[in-house]
Image: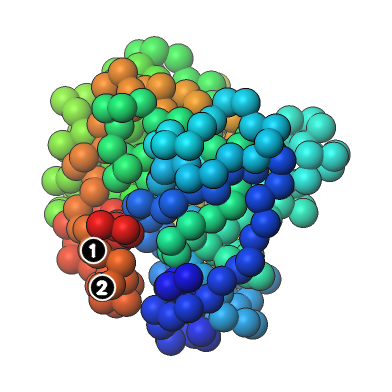
Amino acid sequence: MKSLVLERKDELRIRDLDPKESLGPADVRIAIKTVGVCGSDVHYYTHGAIGPFVVREPMILGHEAAGIIEEVGSAVQNLKVGDRVCMEPGIPDPQSRASRLGLYNLDPAVRFWATPPVHGVLRPSVVHPAAFTFKLPDNVSYAAGAMVEPLAVGFHAISKARLTPGAIALVTGAGPIGMVTAIAALSAGCARVIVTDVVDEKLAVARKLGPAVMTVNVRSQDLKSIIARETDGWGVDVVFECSGAAEVIADTVHHGCPGGAIVFVGMPVKPVPLDVVIAQTKELRIEHVFRYAHVYPRIVALLGSNQINVDALITDTYAFEDAIEAFDYAVRPKPSSVKIQIELGR
Ligand SMILES: [Zn+2]
């Protein structure tokens, strides 16, 4: 099957590569329709590795996907041929201790698409467990369906924050993950979501997410005084750190209110300092997210009822034939680009 293959660092090809998957009784076969390009895909392309995950053999990229069911296993009850679906890309071992505790995203044995040595889904079809495949309502496009994966990170962060309606949240970093976290915070009933970045074009996209979004360019504006003004000097209820930048991470403890929370979503490239005493004097609750668990059905439902909309985030769409061009663009995108997607089987 014609796939987008990362042969090695810096070398992509569209060529035949068939992962030869067999359909088990609890699996479905899905014809892939839309795949989003993730920062991790781009990083494997430009660096050949993310931390301990090293590309040693040709690997198909892509893990943010939606498609249509073309075959179902004999034991599958909840899905049928022709259903439009999106998929959770990580398959844990159901017997693992993490899975049994409900923390299946933390299963060390999880097999996650486009994480070496597991192939991704920039290819015509994939076999996947029905349990990790979710039917899309008729009014949710494949493009929106392929956004459920990044949205899942934002919604998992909201669960960790234990947000309550009327809260004031700070989202540091207006990249794709900052954007989906802002959408999730709005959907959880935040009265105000302050989104920061250093690039005006990205902040302009963030403002399209809703009237409760306020943006701050931290290069030209003083975030501390803006937070003081917006919160009567108290601080924000929750900081969602989505930049991964060391200086921004260090400032999170200053922005959170007494009894508030910090959720670390962005991943710094190396260890970073944090002033624990300031966090202690405020009894800040510090949470972390790694991917997500148990959020897909809720996000699909919110998209179906039009409570959330991701159209503003899907900024660039390429045909599969132009997938290499899409990746080369993703390496150096325009600052106004948020999510680049690739369409298959048109
Ligand atoms: Zn992703």
Q: Mark 2 points at which residue?
A: 322
Q: How far apart are marks 2 and 1 (CA)?
A: 6 Å
Tally of marks: 2
Q: Identify the residue at horizontal 66%, vertical 50% (top origin).
A: 23
Point 28% across, 72% down: residue: 321
Which quadrant of the view contains residue 205? top left
Residue 15 visible in this rendered orientation of the protein = yes
Residue at the image position 37 percent from the left and 40 percent from the top? 145
Residue 156 point in image, percent of width and height: 53, 34
Residue type at mark 2: give it: Asp
Q: Position of residue 117 (x, y in %)?
A: 66, 70
Task: Kindly state the secondary structure of the residue where label 2 is placed.
Answer: helix
- Name the mark on residue 196: none
Specify whether 268 is left or right of 116. left
* Front residue (pair 40, 117): 117
Label 2 environment density (alpha carbons within 10 Å; few <14, some 14–19, many ≥20):
few
Q: In which quarter of the image is residue 14?
A: bottom left
Residue 104: x percent and y percent? 71, 39
Up the image or down, 48 lies above or below 340; here it is below
Horizontal and vertical percent for residue 346?
A: 25, 57
Please determine whether, in this image, residue 161 is positioned above or below residue 26: above
Q: Could you tell me if the residues under marks 2 and 1 are in contact, i.e. CB atoms within 8 Å? A: yes
Left or right position of 17 against 124: right
User: Which residue lies most toward the top here?
Assistant: 165
- Inspect the image, locate mark 1, and give the three-letter code of the amino acid beneath it: Tyr
Residue sitting at x 43%, y 61%: 124
Q: Is mark 1 within 8 Å of ligand 1?
A: no
Instruction: Judge from the rendering whether residue 344 lies leftward or rightward of residue 6; answer left or right.
Output: left
Task: Please say which color scheme the image uses.
Answer: rainbow
Residue where numbered disc 1 is placed: 318
| SS type, badge 1 | strand
